[in-house]
């Protein structure tokens, strides 16, 4: 069986969803602001660690999140409906006020960072908290990843191909985050305020469509069972 097509379909579902909610380009601008007093080597180290940590968070959520919830008796269709609604609601908020979302991220991260005159090792220790959680891959990203994990088998995709495609999407997002954060000072100059707003709204619109699609994948089987019964 050729698994390339199903795996590619999973990748094409997961990549834009995760890219939209993580939004590494917008995150890089904030990363540049809150780590601006650190030296370039320290910031490069932080970018690498955040990228690796983000990959771990997304992969664990994709692979294990839906199984953990299923353990508590939550069906996949219910999880798709709830998760899709959360994703769509989050996207709607981002679409209407992306500046509020980014400002909240910045405040969460900045409030937990050490003072700029502290030891570089102390600054580097902040790579997981708060720069990975909740700044880069916070509750919204985890919710999206868990919801994407419920799509296994929804379209007849073999499990191996599904998880390969989704995992590749998560790793790709983590790599983009690493590169974006490492080049944060340059991106800030290139994008500017207008570019950040445009990117945020475009990402939010894509994420809204994905949230609605996931809701439909849970609602259609439920309606079918109700009508058949």
Image (cartoon, grey):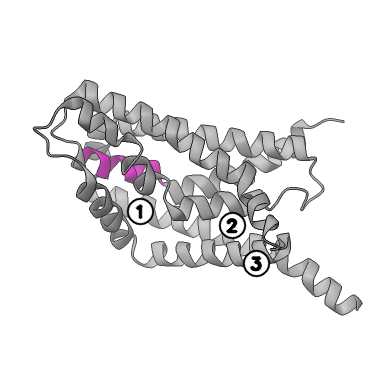
Instruction: Measure the alpha-carbon separation of dots 2 and 1.
Output: 19 Å
Left or right, residue 49 beside residue 2: left
Residue 173 can be seen, yes or no: no
The residue singled out by tag 1 in the image is 198
Left/right of residue 32 with respect to residue 145 in the rendered view: left
Coordinates of residue 205 in the picture (x, y in percent): 48, 59
Looking at the rendered image, the disc whose residue lies closer to the viewer, 3 or 1, is 3
The residue closer to the viewer here, 3 or 128, is 128
The N terminus sits in image quarter:
top right
Residue at 75%, 35% in the rendered image: 160
| 156 versus 182 height, above or below | below
Mark 2 or mark 1: whose residue is earlier in sequence: 1
User: In the visual, does 221 lie left or right of 23?
Assistant: right
Q: Nearer the viewer, residue 101 or 132?
A: 132
- Element marked by disc 2: helix
**Residue to which mark 3 is pinned:** 81
Q: Which mark is residue 210?
A: 2
Q: Residues within 10 Å of mark 2 (few under 14, many from 20)?
A: many
**Could you give the CA–CA distance between mark 2 and mark 3, rounded to whole angstroms?**
12 Å
Number of other residues with Cα within 10 Å of mark 3, as a class: few under 14, some 14 to 19, many 20 or more = many
Is the residue under label 3 in contact with that under label 2 (CB below 8 Å)?
no
Q: Is residue 212 above or below residue 16?
A: below
Label 1 SS: helix
Residue 188 position within the rendered picture, expressed as x and y whole percent measured from the top left? 24, 39
**Residues shaded magenta:** 23-32
């Amino acid at each position: 069986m050729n698994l390339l097509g199903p795996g590619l379909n999973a990748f094409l579902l997961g990549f834009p969803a995760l890219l939209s909610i993580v939004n590494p380009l917008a995150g890089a601008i904030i990363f540049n602001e809150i780590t601006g007093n650190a030296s370039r080597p320290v910031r490069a180290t932080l970018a690498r660690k955040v990228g690796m940590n983000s990959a771990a968070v997304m992969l664990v959520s994709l692979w294990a999140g839906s199984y953990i919830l299923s353990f508590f008796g939550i069906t996949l269709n219910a999880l798709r409906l709830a998760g899709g609604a959360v994703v769509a609601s989050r996207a709607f908020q981002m679409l209407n006020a992306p500046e509020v979302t980014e400002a909240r991220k910045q405040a969460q991260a900045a409030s937990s960072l050490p003072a700029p005159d502290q030891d570089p090792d102390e600054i580097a220790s902040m790579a997981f908290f708060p720069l990975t959680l909740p700044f880069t891959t916070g509750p919204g990203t985890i919710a999206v990843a868990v919801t994407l994990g419920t799509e296994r088998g929804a379209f007849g995709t073999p499990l191996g191909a599904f998880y390969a495609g989704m995992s590749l999407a998560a790793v790709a997002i983590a790599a983009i985050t690493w590169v974006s954060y490492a080049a944060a000072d340059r991106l800030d100059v290139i994008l500017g305020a207008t570019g950040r707003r445009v990117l945020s709204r475009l990402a939010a619109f894509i994420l809204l469509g994905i949230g609605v699609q996931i809701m439909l994948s849970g609602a259609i089987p439920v309606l079918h069972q109700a009508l058949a019964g």
